[in-house]
Image: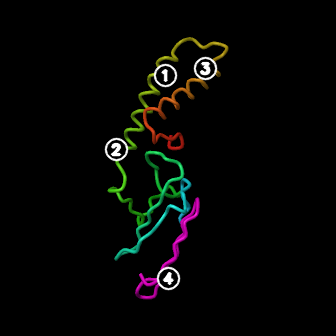
Amino acid sequence: MEKEEIQFKENIIYVSAINKDGKHYELILNLLRPIIPENCSYSVLQKGLKLKVHKQIKEPCWKRLTKEKEKQHFLIKDKILGDGNDCEEAKEIWFSYYMFHKRKMNSPPSKNESNKKKDLVENIIENLKNEHPNFSLHEY
């Protein structure tokens, strides 16, 4: 890469680069979740760029990097930097709490049912935060 310009913004990553043959590339990534631009960085590799992006909200995993639902084949996640089990652990913890409280709620409905459900959801969220410090409701 001869020349590159990378801009990190809260919800966007802008990439402009010129390769050794003089061909210009431009890319705008509309992020699924916000990032902390000041903590993000990049490095030039032999075959492209390596972007290091810091999440604004600590959560075990993102479904994907961008808002686009189709896979961006030029984006490759560095699996060495993250723990692949984080997502599965968070989902398992959430599911076990969900099933536990669902079984508890099989009693007949009462007048205060909406308040009970609200309290139940808040209780589940609080328990998940205590059990898994990186838990985030945004993922689910």
Answer few, some or many: residues within 10 Å of disc 2's Cα (few below 14, many 20 plus, some between 14 and 19).
few
Outermost residue, bottom side: 21
- Which residue carries the number 4 mark? 24
The spot of residue 128 in percent (x, y) is 47, 32
Q: Measured along the vertical axis of the image, is residue 115 above or below residue 26?
A: above
Q: Earlier in the sequence, mark 4 or mark 1?
A: 4
Q: Measured along the vertical axis of the image, is residue 46 above or below residue 119?
A: below
Give the side of residue 68 with respect to residue 61, left or right: right
- Which residue carries the number 3 mark? 116
**Residue 19 colored magenta?**
yes
Instruction: Tell me what residue is drawn at x 53 percent, y 64 percent.
Output: 29
Answer few, some or many: residues within 10 Å of disc 3's Cα (few below 14, many 20 plus, some between 14 and 19).
some
User: Label 1 vs label 2: CA separation?
Assistant: 25 Å
Q: Measured along the vertical axis of the image, is residue 16 above or below residue 61?
A: below
User: Label 1 vs label 3: CA separation?
Assistant: 12 Å
Q: Nearer the viewer, residue 16 or 105?
A: 16
Q: Secondary structure at mark 3?
A: helix
Q: Earlier in the sequence, mark 1 or mark 2?
A: 2
Q: Earlier in the sequence, mark 3 or mark 4?
A: 4
- Over which residues does the magenta segment extend? 1-28
Q: Earlier in the sequence, mark 3 or mark 2?
A: 2
- Which residue carries the number 2 mark? 85
Which amino acid is tagged 4?
Answer: His
Q: Earlier in the sequence, mark 1 or mark 3?
A: 1
